């Protein structure tokens, strides 16, 4: 992701823009001898989830995973640092590349159009100069990146881009948390886009020949429930509903679905998935009062799991590992960019 204040209109690859501004020195405290793993790290409010994948195999192979709850008592920074280092040790893999994520609510995404003839540095300069008009935010307070989507449907002489930005303080806070644990971060992603990549491994998220595929995710987190809706893998709706300790998660999720269904661009989801770590009961039982029965994420058909990891514990943790898996998938892309 570029630091707008210091970008200097860098020359970039046309179709994929890297996250160079987030690369920094560090070391993952892994103790295994195997190298080359793509690692995704999901830093939550109550736990840290980490996944190591081998993307050189077909299908993609799960190498290891770790779920570490944050300890009570210490300050937030210390608890996160300890959990990150513990998760890294449990992976027992020396990573080739590491990806982390920022919360969906902290990202600003816009689809913009630019002249199609612009190349490399000229394209980056054009986007940098138009940022304030597009995002209505002070440019020196943002990190940003963008990627080409293809020719504009309305005008073939223009190119559509996906522009994504975030306040610098949010990215720097995530970067600082990883740095305190001596972990090098190569890619920064957004949580909902990581979820979308994981959904693609279920085998249910492929659009048919004649229509798109709409997937919804009910994400049960610590004192909140999120609803994310994707159209052919692209985020189209996101919201977070607060949840008090005595709240019924089904009622909170129902309110989130009602709010989505009341929006003018709402489409009926083909599947509703249950994800998150603060569930505590079987997903179908938890959400039995919902009109759209959620599918508990207990298996990923596109992910090969070695025999020693094929346990009931893993099946119960897929819903907690969804973001980390999606981050590892992005980390292993040689053309990875922040999106």
Image (tube, grey):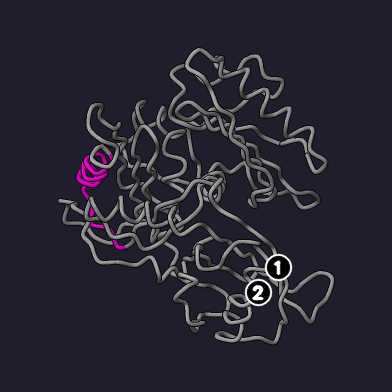
Q: Distance between the residues labelled 2 and 1?
A: 10 Å
Residue at 46 percent across and 58 percent down: it is 330
Q: Earlier in the sequence, mark 2 or mark 1?
A: 1
| Magenta stretch, residue numbers | 80-96
Task: State the SS at label 2.
Answer: helix
Q: Where is residue 214 in the image (x, y as percent from the top left)?
A: 70, 42
The location of residue 306, given as percent across then percent down, is: 32, 42
Q: In this view, does 152 lie above or below 200?
A: below
Label 1, on which residue?
A: 112
| Residue at the image position 69 percent from the left and 24 percent from the top | 292
Secondary element at image label 1: strand
- In the image, residue 56 above or below residue 311: below
Dot label at residue 52 = none
Q: Quadrant of residue 154?
A: bottom right
Instruction: State yes or no: discs 2 and 1 in contact (Cβ < 8 Å).
Output: yes
**Residue 75 at x, y = what percent?**
25, 35
- Horizontal side, residue 224 vs residue 316: left or right: right
* Relative depth, front residue between 98 and 271: 98
- Residues 129 and 286: in front is 129
Q: In this view, does 85 lie to the left or right of 163?
A: left
Query: What x and y, as percent, mark residue 256?
Result: 66, 29
From the image, which quarter does the C terminus lie in? Answer: bottom right
Name the residue: 42% across, 39% down: 321
Residue shown at 25% from the left, 26% from the top: 72
- Check residue 209 for magenta coloring: no
Q: Mark 2 points at which residue?
A: 130
């Amino acid at each position: 992701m570029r630091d707008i204040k210091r970008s200097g209109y860098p020359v970039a690859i046309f179709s994929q823009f890297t996250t160079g501004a987030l690369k920094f020195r560090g070391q993952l405290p892994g103790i295994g001898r195997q190298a080359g793993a793509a690692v995704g790290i999901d830093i939550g409010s109550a736990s840290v989830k980490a996944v190591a994948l081998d993307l050189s195999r077909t299908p993609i192979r799960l190498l290891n995973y770790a779920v570490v709850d944050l300890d009570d008592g210490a300050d937030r920074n210390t608890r996160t640092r300890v959990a990150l280092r513990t998760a890294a040790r449990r992976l027992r893999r020396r990573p080739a590349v590491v990806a982390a994520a920022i919360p969906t609510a902290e990202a600003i995404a816009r689809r913009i159009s630019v002249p199609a003839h612009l190349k490399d540095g000229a394209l980056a300069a054009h986007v940098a100069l138009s940022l304030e008009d597009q995002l209505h935010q002070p440019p020196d307070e943002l990190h940003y990146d963008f990627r080409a989507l293809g020719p504009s449907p309305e005008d073939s002489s223009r190119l559509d881009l996906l522009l994504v930005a975030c306040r610098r303080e949010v990215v720097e806070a995530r970067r600082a948390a990883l740095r305190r644990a001596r972990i090098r971060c190569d890619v920064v992603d957004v949580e909902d886009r990581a979820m979308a990549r994981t959904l693609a491994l279920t085998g249910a998220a492929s659009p048919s020949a004649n229509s798109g595929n709409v997937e919804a995710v009910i994400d049960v987190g610590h004192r909140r429930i999120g609803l994310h809706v994707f159209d052919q893998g692209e985020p189209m709706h996101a919201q977070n509903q607060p949840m008090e300790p005595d709240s019924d998660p089904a009622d909170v999720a129902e309110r989130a679905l009602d709010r989505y269904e009341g929006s003018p661009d709402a489409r009926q989801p083909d599947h509703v998935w249950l994800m998150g770590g603060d569930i505590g009961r079987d997903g179908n039982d938890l959400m039995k009062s919902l009109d759209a029965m959620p599918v508990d994420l207990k298996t990923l058909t596109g992910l090969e799991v070695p025999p020693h990891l094929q346990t009931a514990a893993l099946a119960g943790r897929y819903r907690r590992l969804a973001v980390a898996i999606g981050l590892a998938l992005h980390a292993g892309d040689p053309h990875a960019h922040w999106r």
